[in-house]
Amino acid sequence: MNDIRAIPKRYFRILLPVLVFIVLATMPHYLPPYAIIVLISIFMYTVLAISWNVFCAPTNYLSLATAAFFGVGVYTSAILQALPLPVVIIISGSLSFLLGLFVGAITLRLRGMYFAIFTFGLSELFRHALIWYEVNITRTVGRWLPLETPVTVYYYMLIILAITLLTAYLIGRSKYGLALQSIGQNEEASAHIGINVNMVKIIAFAVTCFFMGATGAVIATRWSYVDPSVAFAPFRSFYIIIMVILGGMQSTIYGPMLGATIVTLLSDVILVDFSRHTMLLFGIILIVVILFLPNGLIGILQRKRRGEEVTALRG
């Protein structure tokens, strides 16, 4: 009897994402252009937030390198703009993946604030190195790009989002996901029971970097001009952390999706009405969330659900 009841739920979990994807795929046909642009931003930040959360949440490693790998994708797209966009996306993601392997190999032995400081310094290193190169070697700062239509960018971002969600789901349900959780709980104990701790961390970190780079390559085609300060903007790394914490880190997918959607919509309002106080307001939001919503919005929903279940059992 239990197996019979479980079958519809299993089909529902498969069909619901497919139906949502179909609905999203049809939206450009009836939504206004501004709504499409907003959805592109939501897709972008959702991919970045989920990618960050897949590695950082279970391992308790705080990475501030999102801007670095995103920027690699942006500049790769600018340099290889003559190639077809799908090829540029694959190359950008692959370069970010290889860079993630290299960075992970030399830094994931660090822990706590040392890893966080290094990853933040990585973004700044890339930004200032490119500025020096363009000022002293090419004698021109920044690059111009041909623009893609919003609908084209929308569909590319939707595909990347779908692949990111599938990858996050598979990792969470695989032995690698369990290994990442084990590392976060006790890294030494994980090594003692036979887990190749360094290899698991490096591969998981590099895989998430792939999606950050691919996202940067697509989003660059929405900007007519990019320079190192735009491509490697450090605020982007902190935005992602705000999104994940607001949504809820304990949920690999739903928390980052919820947080990315809310913060993206909120940032549009703030940039229009309070453009001079953007970082101040987001700093206040981060403090409030940490103090009063340590488990994020998903944590509130889960607590409410558990309370309803307890009430039902008592009744």
Image: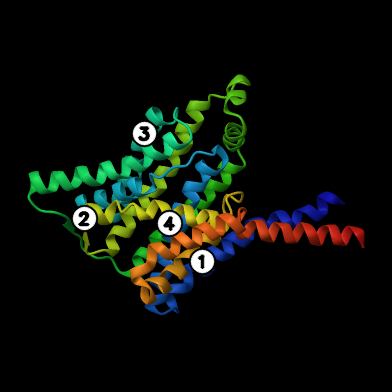
Decide: is 39 above or below 76: below
**Spatial CA span between label 1 and label 4:** 12 Å
Q: Which residue lies under the disc numbered 1?
A: 262
| Amino acid at pointer 3 | Val
Nearest-to-viewer mark from 4 and 3: 4
Q: Name which of mark 4 and mark 3 comes first in the sequence.
A: 3
| Amino acid at pointer 2 | Asp
The quarter in which the C terminus is drawn is bottom right
Image location (x, y in percent) of residue 202: 45, 32
CB under 8 Å between callouts 4 and 3? no
Q: Residue at x 45, y 27 (%)?
A: 109
Q: Which residue lies under the disc numbered 2?
A: 227
Q: Answer left or right for 263 relative to 93.
A: right
| Amino acid at pointer 4 | Tyr
Decide: is 163 above or below 284: above
Between 96 and 4, the one lying in front of the other is 96
Image location (x, y in percent) of residue 94: 34, 41
CB under 8 Å between callouts 2 and 4? no
Q: Name which of mark 1 and mark 2 comes first in the sequence.
A: 2
Image location (x, y in percent) of residue 73: 31, 49
Between 254 and 26, the one lying in front of the other is 254
**Spatial CA span between label 1 and label 2:** 28 Å
| Amino acid at pointer 1 | Ile
Q: Residue at x 47, y 52 (%)?
A: 241
Identify the disc placed on residue 239: 4
**Spatial CA span between label 4 and label 3:** 22 Å
Q: Which residue lies under the disc numbered 3?
A: 103
**Image quarter of residue 215:** bottom left
